[in-house]
Image (spheres, helix red, strand yellow):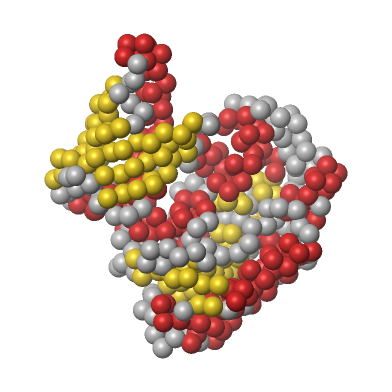
Amino acid sequence: MPVPADVAFAWHERPGAFERLAPPWQRVREIERRGTIRDGDRAVIELHHGLLRRRWVAVHHSYEQNRQFADRQESGPFASWEHVHRFVPTTGETSTLEDEITYRLPFGLFGSLLGRRYAERTLARTFAYRDRRLADDLRRHTDAKAPLRVAITGSTGLIGRSLAAFLRTGGHDVITVSRRPQPGGIVWDPGAGLLEAEALAGVDAVVHLAGEPIGRRWTQARKREIVESRVRGTELLAKTLASLEHRPSVLVSASAIGFYGDRGDEPLDEASERGSGFLAGVCDAWEAACAPAHDAGIRVVNLRIGVVLEAVLPRLLPVFRAGVGGRVGSGRQWWSWISLDDLTAAVLHAITTDGLDGPVNAVAPEACTNADAMRTLARVLRRPCVAPLPAAAARMAFGELAREVLLAGQHVLPTRLETSGFRFAYPRLEAALRHTLGR
């Protein structure tokens, strides 16, 4: 690990560690936790495998601060399971994490004969993912400042959940802002103009991710929801922050590369002009709604987010695994993407980099065409890429959404992220896919 043993150990003791270490291809959810990782503390994990659902109850023991902890299965899918985590100092600034696992499969000798090879492959794949993500997270947090108090809107979405876990394991205090009450969180209702200003007092940074998803066919009513959920919510938040006596130092507000419209092969950086179309107008109004915060002296970063791999893969994987995947339309449209790990790290970078403000493109350095992206996914999955979705069929199925999202493209460059010192863990698509899919 790129940090001393005590730092790596502390990471595991914090809320969010389970979420950060759970591979995205495994359908697992922590539904109950009592304590942390000390002796007698318990965790209840729900496992999904196809239509089957199973609970795994783990009890912690053998806790030695900064040296080791262990968990034993009380009930679950194995006949027995024990996992010892050891933290071994190597030099002053690095350490080694040793995982010792002892298990028995169910159904005795029969289960062992049939399942041993599959179990070993699964464990190797899982722990390779865990080791990569843990090392990346620890490295990211060593570059950050002292622990911060961060409020997050949209904290129940894919990006928000991942960001909250990432920040908490780094030692930051996260306050969720959502429509549904959450422990220690803030309730708001942008449609009704309700947000408790006093609850945001003393916050160091605010990350604004809330907005209606765009991935369904756009009716006129749906388009109004997309616009209002972004503009009204952002205006409410920006005005509320501006009204505080003790304001946060920074507001990181989500936007999207749809700001640039369909631009063909033109390379686009943050200085490029706004494009045309519905999404370009939405993004422009979304960013402009931050003005009250900016005028009050709060540093505002408008993060123009590209295609987040973990958001689109659930739709692509069933098609490709069935052997009927392929490009969309001509496939020549540019696909500017980013991994979820790099996106969450980019948010922290935006929070802690004082000179960064205004529009910032959150995309990987290696953009590719849609056809190249689909061929890369097929190669990683070892599946064919032979069944394109014709443009006419896409327009018939998705209407305006197809024209502005599926068939449009932007070749976007992360110029300001890179010049401000941000380091991508996954700058290339194939490596990002192999990490995310455990391939």
Tell me the quarter of the picture where residue 170 sits. Answer: bottom left
Above or below for 25 versus 110 = below
Q: Residue 251 at what x, y percent from top left?
A: 49, 74
Q: Say which residue appears at 57% left-offset and 42% top-offset.
A: 429
Above or below for 206 versus 140 = below
Q: Residue 4 at what x, y percent from top left?
A: 22, 50
Q: Say which residue appears at 37% left-offset and 67% top-offset.
A: 184
Compare residues 9 and 275 and report the one nearer the observer: 9
Q: Say which residue appears at 56% left-offset and 65% top-offset.
A: 210
Please say whether residue 416 is visible from this viewpoint: no
Compare residues 344 and 45 and report the one nearer the observer: 45
Q: Residue 27 at what x, y percent from top left?
A: 47, 38
Q: Say which residue appears at 39% left-offset and 85% top-offset.
A: 246
Above or below for 27 versus 143 = above
Above or below for 53 versus 166 = above
User: Is residue 271 toward the left or the right of residue 401 in the image?
Assistant: left
User: Is residue 79 toward the left or the right of residue 322 in the image?
Assistant: left
